[in-house]
Image: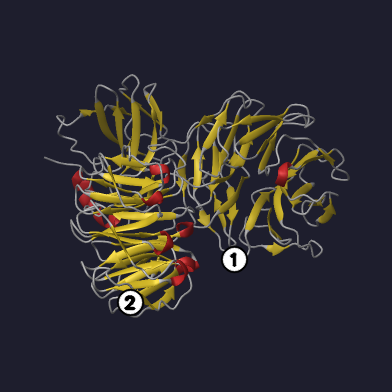
Amino acid sequence: MKKLATIFLIMLPFMLSAQWNWLNPSPQGDAVTDMYFIDNTTGFASTLSGAILKSSNAGDSWSIADKPTDQCLNAIFFTGASTGFACGDNGTFIKTTDGGNSWIQILTSYTSDNFTDLYFLNADTGFICGDYGFLIRTNNGGQNWSVISVGGSSENMTSFCFPTATTGYISAEDGYFFKTTDRGTTWTEIDAGVAEDFQCIWFVDANTGWMAGDWGAVFKTTNGGTSWSSQSISTHEDIQACSFIDANTGFLSSDGVIFKTTNGGSTWTPYSMGNYDYIQSIWAFDASIVVAGNDFAQLFKTTNGGTSWSDNSSYLITPSIQFNDVVCFDNNIILVAGADGAIFRSANGGNNWDSIPSGITSKINDIELFNTSTAFACSNNGQIIKTIDAGASWSILTTGTPNWLLSVFAVDASNIWTCGLGGTILKSVNGGTSWTPQTSGTTNLLYDISFADANNGVAVGLGGVVLRTTDGGANWNPATSGTSQSIYSVIHLSADTIIAGGWNGVLLHSYDAGATWGSTTINDGYGIQNLLFTSTDTLYAFGIGGKIGFSNDRGITWNAGEHFTGWLVTSIAEAPSGTLYATGYNSMMLHRGPLPGVGFDENDPENYSVLSIFPNPATETIFVDVMSGASYSIFNATGQLLLSGFATTNSIDVSSLKPGLYFIRIESAKETKRGKFLKAD
């Protein structure tokens, strides 16, 4: 019997080097920094992690088109249906010539500069601005750049607008702006006469425009910037972006609020998104249809001018939770936990998630997986909870301390330790039923604890503290770490080899059971929040800014791993299959490797109903024998969820997918249908 699993075996070398893929939120979880629509349906957005998003239906749904860089992208711009550009931190500049399906990075010589915005007059002539009066120009589509003198200005430039082919403006901080009337050949720095940091600018013609920025500042000119008048708006929060339709109608974005004017800014009406997350990007098609993206990756749309908004991102887990740990009981049962006692559990490898009552409301900081059914979790307020049914239910254990507990570690069914605030170390010798305080000899916060066996352990914490015990914690002795940086994580690779990671990328290593320590710096100096040692002897160090380092020689040499997010990555766990799961801020859940249940036996109809798909191969749209009220999910061959939604008609738009093999699953309350199709050019 031919099985699709055969395809997975053939693709195994590819899977072993597979990229990280977003499970939650979808299509991704990083800040949406800018957006640009080339027509009334097709648009693109840039993100904090260097991904480019695409929408083919005016912002109703989005998918990841490409991820050409690990750098934060701050701005995106198109000169037509085919050619587009984006720029970002550390001199990053990327370009597409195939309508945004693929992007290439063009190296610049300005790697110490953060690019804040860009504008192109045509496919060849364009500009990039940045901090401290940084302004460059290209005349050959970004292949080469030259610096434009702005009279020695040191102002931070923030945003471009060219209302005509010859007249352009750049907003800046400290109440300044820049103006050109010769297609950007020369620029003049002008004091707007107000002490405001402007973040965005928009002109509807050569004379009429607005600048907006920090502390709710909104100013308007009707004479090309010769004079500016303040406009009243009901916020003191920073204005991040703006988009105008004409001289009367425009929109501003702030902290979870969109402001709209229909009278040139004489009055502004606020429309709330229901949260307080900064909206960094906004695009108005007309007075009614507006699309926006915020710091937490939410992609909003209104069709009634802002009265109501839909969030067109999709979620398997409640959004905007800080998760602190993830564990895999087996290939199917995955658990994440974090803020406010939140626990979510998947019984099918991450394809679906259920909220599980933890019995507590304090932040869960760490989960210790003892076996395939038993785990402990520690939290703030001195609480520890325990499960004996693979996370389906939890009971609260009495610890006797009100102190925050940040780490818990079990060497066997009886001996368990936890550590936390004020140098707290507790030990249980009866599986958590009772706990006894141990004397740590420090009042510093202890972030993590690890044992090689029932006697030999190490605890690490604030200010470079490293403690060592050889008698199960009866005595804890300080070891010289050689650093004053806080140490957040420690792991035993063997009885003698111990690795610890901390602030500013400090990595400690001991080869004598913690008696002496050496150090190095990895991950570009970003803080190391946690460590993972996999079954394939790969050691991962990860944390601040989504930076991941990995070592194949037990920490002697290090390489940079894929940078899939700009958020803090708090934990990575390995399933028995080798698939990795990562979590962190913003309800982040990603996987690296295939998910269970994505591949299926196409010749065994007893497991599911075969879905009829036409045409196959497809180019733009597939037609399916849809079930009323059904939901659909489309995966690639590595298990990455690419598209999802509700199949209210029998057609599904697949134009955003790249050419290749895809699996589709359609589910209703009555049945599940599955199929596969090829996407052609």
Quarter location, residue 110? bottom right
Element assignment for label 1: loop
Q: Quadrant of the N terminus?
A: top left
Residue at image coords 54%, 42%? 44
Of callouts 2 and 1, the N-terminal one: 1
User: Residue 670 placed where, x, y %?
Assistant: 25, 21
Closer-to-camera residue (154/529): 529
Identify the coloring.
secondary structure
Q: Is residue 41 visible?
A: no
Q: Say which residue label 2 marks.
A: 510
User: Residue 486 placed where, x, y %?
Assistant: 46, 67
Residue at image coords 47%, 64%? 527
Closer-to-camera residue (516/585): 516
Query: Amino acid under label 1?
Result: Thr
Query: Amino acid under label 2?
Result: Ser
Locate residue 189 relative to residue 599 in the image: left or right: right
Residue at image coords 20%, 51%? 9
Mark 2 surroundings within 10 Å by alpha-carbon count, few (fewer than 14), some (14 through 19), many (20 or more): some
Quarter location, residue 238? top right
Element assignment for label 2: strand
Mark 1 surroundings within 10 Å by alpha-carbon count, few (fewer than 14), some (14 through 19), many (20 or more): few
Residue at image coords 80%, 65%? 152
Q: Is residue 487 above or below residue 243?
A: below
Q: Is residue 339 visible?
A: yes
User: Residue 113 placed where, x, y %?
Assistant: 63, 63
Closer-to-camera residue (521/609): 521
What is the CA distance from the residue labelled 2 to the residue labelled 1?
Answer: 36 Å
Quarter location, residue 37? top right
Locate residue 299 relative to residue 234 in the image: left or right: left
Q: Say which residue label 1 marks.
A: 111
User: Residue 421 placed where, x, y %?
Assistant: 42, 59
